[in-house]
Amino acid sequence: MNGETDSVMAGERVFRGQRTADVPWPVAAVVGGRERRLGGNPRELHDPWDGTRLPSLADCSPADVNDAVCIARATFERGTWSRERVSTRRAVLLRWADALESHATTLAMLDAMSTGKLAAETCDVDVPFAARVVRWFAESLDKSAGAVAASGADHLAWVTSQPLGVAATVVPWNYPVGIAVWKMAPALAAGNSVILKPHEHTPYSALLIARLAYSAGLPEGVLSVVPGGPATGAALGLHSEIDARPSPGQGGSEPGSSNTPPHPTSRTSPWIVAERVPCLSSPTRTISRLSLRVCDTAYSATGALSAPQPHYC
């Protein structure tokens, strides 16, 4: 699918040969495999490190969400993916994993400028993790089968796995690549249709991930990415045609919500600082090394990592 993109006009930065000015920023939702320019007021997004304005992206409306769900349901019932041969699903997923790795630098730049994380962390940790997750579930498809349960001589009890239908999930902002793929890969491998809502501050990498899935051969209609805020999440979480709603993160209490740390650009919430970080030390470990480890442990799960040269370390 040909992606609709925008660019960022900012100070020149380079990460592993790629300039920030050349990064293709997705600026359209992916609804049923087709890109959709959204109406409504665009959401202003900024780089949390230096305030650089990022390409604007409007929220998906409840009508957009309903379209995505209806397309997902119709695709599931047609069986173009849900009843596809295991060998075909496996091949598509493996090509998707390869595409994730080949676009690691771009994904890293998208996440670095929207989350404030180090680009190296996404490129060297998050993307390889995501690719391994996809490959694990792809390779498991032809290695797990049903079973014959114990029964009487006049009965046959067969246990088998079937796709549920339409799965919806919401992911937090701090690991946009890793958690998005972590949620999508097993559901897609099983033959489900999937609708994902990324965090409203970090939608870009999820939109690119969806494009890569379709370029790998995923049939149209199987996967949608609907960016937006609480209203979008509520429309998705409360839709009657959703069959599975995986937990978005650390136990969100509202439909489509995620109880994860606030994004660094949030005006209503300060940075999360760990008050207690238990750790074990030894006489040979210096205070400076220990404090660096404590800081890394306290902030890594929140995405709140920085360095003298942010994004590109």
Image (cartoon, rainbow, N blue to C red):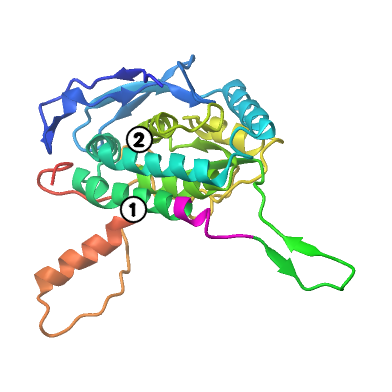
Task: Check residue 243 in the rendering and tell me which mark sits there, or answer none.
Answer: none
- Please determine whether, in this image, residue 232 is positioned above or below residue 9: below
Depth check: give the residue in front, 221 or 24.
221
Question: Label 1: which residue?
Answer: 129
Q: Residue at x 33, y 42 (%)?
A: 98
Classify mark 1: residues with Cα within 10 Å, few (<14), some (14-19) or many (20+). some
Question: Start and end of the magenta stretch?
Answer: 138-145
Question: What residue is at 36 percent from the left and 53 percent from the top?
Answer: 132
Q: In the image, what residue occupies the spot 73% across and 67% down?
A: 148
Please state the horizontal and vertical placement of residue 175, each as a whole percent of the image.
Answer: 36, 47
Kindly give the residue lying farthest to the right in the view shown. 154
Give the distance between the C-alpha atoms of the residues marked 2 and 1, in whole angstroms: 15 Å
Is 70 contained in the magenta span?
A: no
Task: Decide if residue 33 is on the left or right side of residue 81.
Answer: left
Q: Quadrant of residue 173?
A: top left
Mark 2, residue position: 205
Per the image, label 2 sits on a secondary structure element best described as helix
Whether 97 is drawn above or below 210: the answer is below
List x then y, in percent, for residue 186. Answer: 51, 50
Whether the magenta-drawn stretch holds residue 140 is answered as: yes
Q: Is residue 312 above or below residue 36?
A: below
Q: Can residue 40 be seen in this snapshot?
A: yes
Q: Residue at x 30, y 46 (%)?
A: 127
Which secondary structure, mark 1? helix
The residue type indicated by label 1 comes to Phe
